[in-house]
Amino acid sequence: MSDGTHTEEAFFKSHFLKTIDSLTNGSEVLLAYDGVLNVDTISRLETEVEGKVTALQIPKGPLKKIFFISVEALQNMLIHGGKDEMGHQHNYFILSKNHTKVEIITSNLVPNGTIERLKGDVERLNSFNDPAELKNYYMEHLEKNEISDKGGAGLGFITIAMKSGNKLGYEFDKISDKLSLFLLKSTVNLE
């Protein structure tokens, strides 16, 4: 294992633990995963998310939103997450709940050169105050049908924002000259 990989892995582990510790206001961690994502891991996590939120007897509307956002966020991390010099992805996923909301927190590596674009994308989505405006933005994006080099059309963040109905939270923490940790937080209201 190279020093760079160890650095990224240790950074993610530390950040993961700090994020869990920062959950307050009576939040309960329903599911927390720190590690490598692959198709099998995502399938297992999707099953665990479904089981956890179904057991809470959350109303059907928020339940569907939580599951949809979780699946979309996990897929986004797998497909678009950056890799360290050894070709490893570093990710984490946290699902937490308090009496009014469920939060889906995801984190993955991103190349530093993509930070400004990602910030702009999230801030653009957060600028919409009317759900109809966000839906129009989604339709415009869909009509352009621009497929990225990783096979996506850039709709993931948009669909997460639409389903959430809330502003997306985000942060970037620099790991090295090449890579940063990108955290995305989605909130689903239970009422």
Image: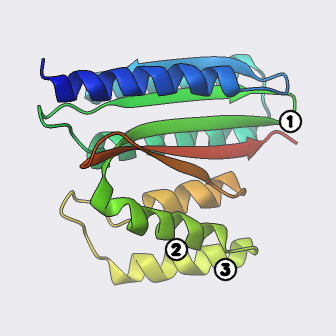
- Eyeballing the image, is 99 above or below 159? above
Task: First in sequence, mark 2 or 3: give its number.
Answer: 3
Query: Residue 160 at x, y = what percent?
Result: 56, 54
For disc 2, the marked residue is 138
Count of numbered marks: 3
Residue 127 visible in the displayed image? yes
Residue name at image x 29 percent, y 46 percent: 179
For the residue pair 16 and 50, the one nearer the viewer reads as 16
Query: Residue 3 at x, y = what percent?
Result: 17, 23
Q: Quadrant of the C terminus?
A: top right
Residue at disc 1, secondary structure = loop
- Eyeballing the image, is 122 above or below 111? below
Label 3 crowd bin: few (<14), some (14–19), many (20+), radius 10 Å: few
Residue at disc 3, secondary structure = helix
Residue at disc 2, secondary structure = helix
For disc 1, the marked residue is 100
Residue name at image x 57 percent, y 36 percent: 105
* Res. 162 image quadrant: bottom right
Task: First in sequence, mark 1 or 3: give its number.
Answer: 1
For the residue pair 78 and 26, the one nearer the viewer reads as 26
For disc 3, the marked residue is 133
Identity of the amino acid at label 2?
A: Tyr
Identity of the amino acid at label 3?
A: Glu
* Cα–Cα span, label 2 and label 3: 9 Å
Q: Is residue 19 left or right of residue 36?
A: right
Q: Is residue 2 left or right of residue 180?
A: left
Task: First in sequence, mark 1 or 2: give its number.
Answer: 1
Label 2 crowd bin: few (<14), some (14–19), many (20+), radius 10 Å: some
Query: Residue 48 at x, y = what percent?
Result: 52, 18
* Res. 180 image quadrant: top left
* Res. 4 image quadrant: top left
